[in-house]
Amino acid sequence: MERMAATETPTSAPRLMFLSTPGEVAERGVHDLARVRALWRHLLDVAAPRSVANTWVVYDEVSWTLGQLIVEGRLLARVHPTAEMRTAGEKLSQEAEELATEIDLDPRLFRALESIPLGSEPSATRFAVTKTIRRMRRNGASLPDADRARVQKLQADTVRLGLEFERNIQDRIRTFDFHDQGEMEGLPSDYLAGHPPRPDGSVAITTSYPDAFPVFKYARRGDVRRRLTVEFLNQAYPENVPVLADLLRQRSALAHALSYPNFAAYATEDKMIGTPDAAAEFLARLDAVARGPAQREFATLLARKQEDEPSATGLGFWDAVMFGGDVGYYTEKIRAERYHADARELRAYFPFDQVREGVMQITGELFGVRFVRVDEPRRWHPSVEVFDLFDGEQRLGRFYLDLHPREGKFTHAMCAEVVLGVAGRAAPEAALVCNFPEPAPGKPALMEPSDVLTFFHEFGHLLHALFSGRGPWTATIMGEIEWDFVEAPSQFLEEWVRDPATLRRFARHYETGEPIPIELAEKWGQAESVSQASLVLRLIANAAISLEYYRREPGSFDTTALARELWEKHQLIGWVEGAHIECRFGHLFGYSALYYTYAWSLVIAKDLFARFRASGALMNPTEGRRYRQAILDPGSTRPAAELIREYLGRVSSLESFERWLDSAAPPPSRAQR
């Protein structure tokens, strides 16, 4: 990997991320918000006939400036080491959101954009302007004055409540105690070494993903897994119970003010799915497809549990499924015992540094790009790494890797925009924010196989943001694409981890340097299918929760009771008594009713991958370039359905997804091992 000094790669520096004090953040905000207000006044004063040049170009600068404050403010709130800077970022992002809402509700500006003649403009410009007009209409710009004022307040309250909901999840990590060594039986040795006992022999861990997931996967005692499950699912309980109730009420009131029957109808209208009824029908269809395979998986897992507990009649949440992106104890047992694909053995081939290099090696070759490490002194934390992305000699953008947990940091995994890439204005920058184990001197950080999948998944988002960051307008960036498509490219990239030949390129034993044996890589690929239909049912259950929360009238249901009802409707795994799953379900703010998008985009991803696989070897730069040009580079310059049709040569269908679900062979019996 190449390395160069920061001065050799000029970049449109982020406005907020490298400031030192909350006062500087506030000052930057005052300056940029004042500029936005001045541009807004200028737009309203244009006397000449409206045109792209005198109206849309100025409006795009307004959008970009506000967008910058919002994305950077949110990122500051999620990653900065000091609470004061996190608070300053959250406050500024909220102020920018409120001003964006005020501008979106301006009927004079709405009429000005509507009057721009678009007949001779490029298609990307026509699409961008049309999308913006539709958004403003949906947000209430054509309403009477009193109604617009009410909508503006409701939207501001929604942002405030959503940020509080997310902050509670981020800040309310719990501590869990192992009382003796017997409770830790089954955990990997490096995990135990990283959690030394207190003087009384007890060991403290947290409900953060790196601490909790190995316990769910490996701890032999079911009572330990159950106790941790309750703590894990109750993170941000009870704090988020009233916050969520208020959030649902405010969004329902907002939907009614905008003449929608419920917020789910509002949220789905401009997505590929179109309506909440269509989303519910899709989930029902997917449930029907996945239920048979999931029942077979359940029977296999229950039979394995009965070897430990002969009287067992069911599986608990702590036995076989996780809220995040991992699998449970008996799924791991089947993988290890029947397929000889023990994650503890696999971890030895996934030291963090090698995985990071492998992600870049594979995607670089696949998409014809190279990654250059930048010696950039400006970082929000010393552990952050900085890279530039090049296509030949053309610099496409910059990205930051913030990949290890620390106090006050976002607790899950995400890709965040840092600089919104628009041609002629700024090169794109993005950040990967994850919580992978951190290497220490003499102690390699061994990653779970699921962590490796997560790394590839989130890196897919990052590449999508950088590749698409050369469009003509802020409205054409990747972040403006339909939400029920945006996960598909990331789910697509996960397939390169599942391919044994590709895996062997970077999966090397941390002690010997030997590549993962082909037999073990193949067995992991086979073992990966264990519980795949059950994981689809988990997606469906969570999607149903998010959809129904926003589809029903607030106050007419208890959030915990409804979550349990929908979980038990769509899942074969039992509910957790005493758990409040909704309190740490962060997507309920950002995604609102749209968690179905993970399942919808997974169907698309399987279809895209089947087309790529049909072209030959997975490391096929020619097909990689074709895929990149059709799916990733365009960003939101066209509707997602058109991008999919261009690459597939047809509309997407469920067939590849159904074949994938049916492809899982029953695990070999004990006698066949």
Image (spheres, helix red, strand yellow):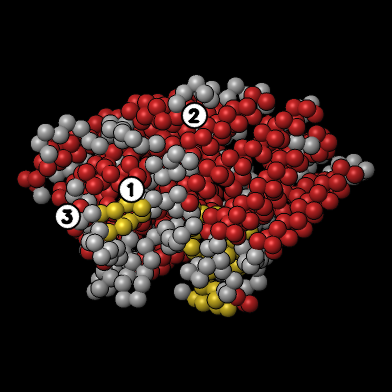
Q: Position of residue 4 (x, y in %)?
A: 55, 78
Kindly indicate the quadrant of the structure image that contains residue 610: top left
Above or below 669: residue 566 = above
Q: Residue 32 in the image: x percent, y percent?
A: 75, 56
Going by the numbered disc 2, the residue's amino acid type is Tyr
What residue is shown with label 1?
326
Q: Which amino acid does label 1 sit on?
A: Asp
**What distance separates the C-alpha of mark 3 from that of mark 1?**
24 Å
Q: Is tag 2's residue or tag 3's residue first in the polypeptide sequence?
A: 3
Q: Which mark is residue 549?
A: 2
- Residue 604 appearing in the image: no
Question: Counting other residues with Cα less than 10 Å from the Cα at mark 1, is it few (<14), some (14-19), or many (20 or more)?
Answer: many
Q: Name the residue under label 3.
A: 182
Q: Is mark 3 on a helix, strand or loop?
A: helix
**Circle 2 crowding by C-alpha within 10 Å: few under 14, some 14–19, many from 20:** many
Q: Distance between the residues labelled 2 and 3?
A: 41 Å
Instruction: Give x and y (percent) for residue 307.
Output: 10, 41
Along the line of sight, the residue nearer the viewer: 342 or 55: 342
Q: Is mark 2 on a helix, strand or loop?
A: helix
Residue at the image position 50 percent from the left and 21 percent from the top: 556
- Marks 3 and 1 close (CB-CB < 8 Å): no
Give the left or right position of residue 155, taking residue 390 as reference.
right
Q: Is residue 369 left or right of residue 568?
A: right
Rendering coords of residue 219 (x, y %): 22, 51
Q: Which residue lies furthest to the left in this view?
A: 671
Residue plotted at (45% across, 26% down): 558
